[in-house]
Image (cartoon, rainbow, N blue to C red):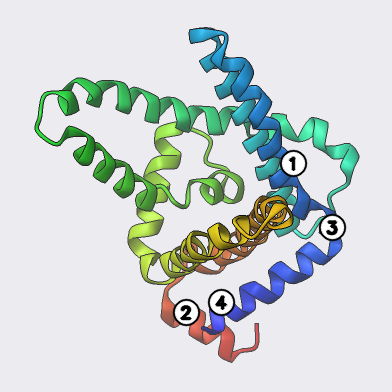
Amino acid sequence: MRTYRLCAVLAARALSKSPWTLLIPPVYAALLVPTAALAAQLGLVGGFVYALVTDALLASLLFVVSELVGGSRVRLHELPRSVGHYFWPIMNVLFVLWIASFLLRPVVASIPNGETFMLGIWLVLFILLNAVPEVIYRRGTYGGLAAIGASIGFVQEHWLVWLPPNLALGALLWFALPPLAAAGPLGFLLAPILAGALIHAFLVFRGFLFEELDGSTSRQRALRHRLGR
């Protein structure tokens, strides 16, 4: 709990320098709506367009989170150039996952309950690859396979501390957002904005948590805390 409190305080301080960035995720999510509508009309080309736009928005968001965790302020005029920093590292990971999905598709189609099996695989991947964003922007691991391998190693070593906050956020979004969205027009409007802001704040928290855990043991962290880090 001490580690969580420390990271929450650091995240709050970082966000206080650029509170406007809390609006970035809901704005980016809103941009994907017309993009998806356009992509649906373009067939195969539309799928590539949607993937590129999604990658660009994720790269921009990752840049913002990286700057905040690094102690910098983020200014609006930085957003246009924010895409370039992590566009290809994210694309590398997505490409590896696409290849894996492509290879698994005929296997899944040939077995009973293939869709359930595939869902289980994606769930395992979601857990093991959970730290990919932090591996990319904190460690600077840009290769697709390298980032995936580093994330798996990190989660295997620190799952007991890393996963509970992620599960807590998922539960909060799962149980709290639907009632809010169903509460009328205002709730319907506020739900995605609050969800996006919460996810953004959580990503900053995760960045500090990753720094706290990476390359350390629980005993080493306890010693640092006793020494008044």
Instruction: Please name the amino acid that badge 4 sits on.
Output: Tyr
Image quadrant of residue 194?
bottom right
Q: Which residue is mark 3?
A: 18
Label pair 2/1, CB-CB below 8 angstroms: no
Q: Residues within 10 Å of mark 4 (few under 14, many from 20)?
A: some
Labels 3 and 4 touching (C-beta < 8 A): no
Q: Earlier in the sequence, mark 4 or mark 1?
A: 4
Amino acid type of the residue tagged 3 in the rendering: Ser
Q: Position of residue 122 (x, y in %)?
A: 32, 42
Q: Position of residue 129 (x, y in %)?
A: 40, 47
Q: Which one is nearer the viewer's eye here, 165 or 135? A: 165
Task: Name the residue that disc number 1 marks.
Answer: 27
Foreground disc of the pair 2, 4: 4
The image shows residue 212, relative to residue 219, as above or below, that is above
Front residue of 201/150: it is 201
The residue tagged 4 is: 4
SS of the residue under disc 4 = helix
* Among numbered discs 3 and 2, the one appearing first in the sequence: 3
**What's the CA distance linking mark 3 and mark 2?**
32 Å
Task: Give the label, 4 or 1, closer to the camera.
Answer: 1
Instruction: Report the side of 71 relative to 66 (left or right).
Output: right
Along the horizontal axis of the image, is 210 left or right of 59?
A: left
Q: Which residue is mark 2?
A: 220
Callout 3 secondary element: loop
Task: Classify 199 as above or below 37.
Answer: below
Query: Between marks 1 and 3, how big is the CA–CA gap?
Result: 16 Å
| Image location (x, y in percent) of residue 130 | 44, 51
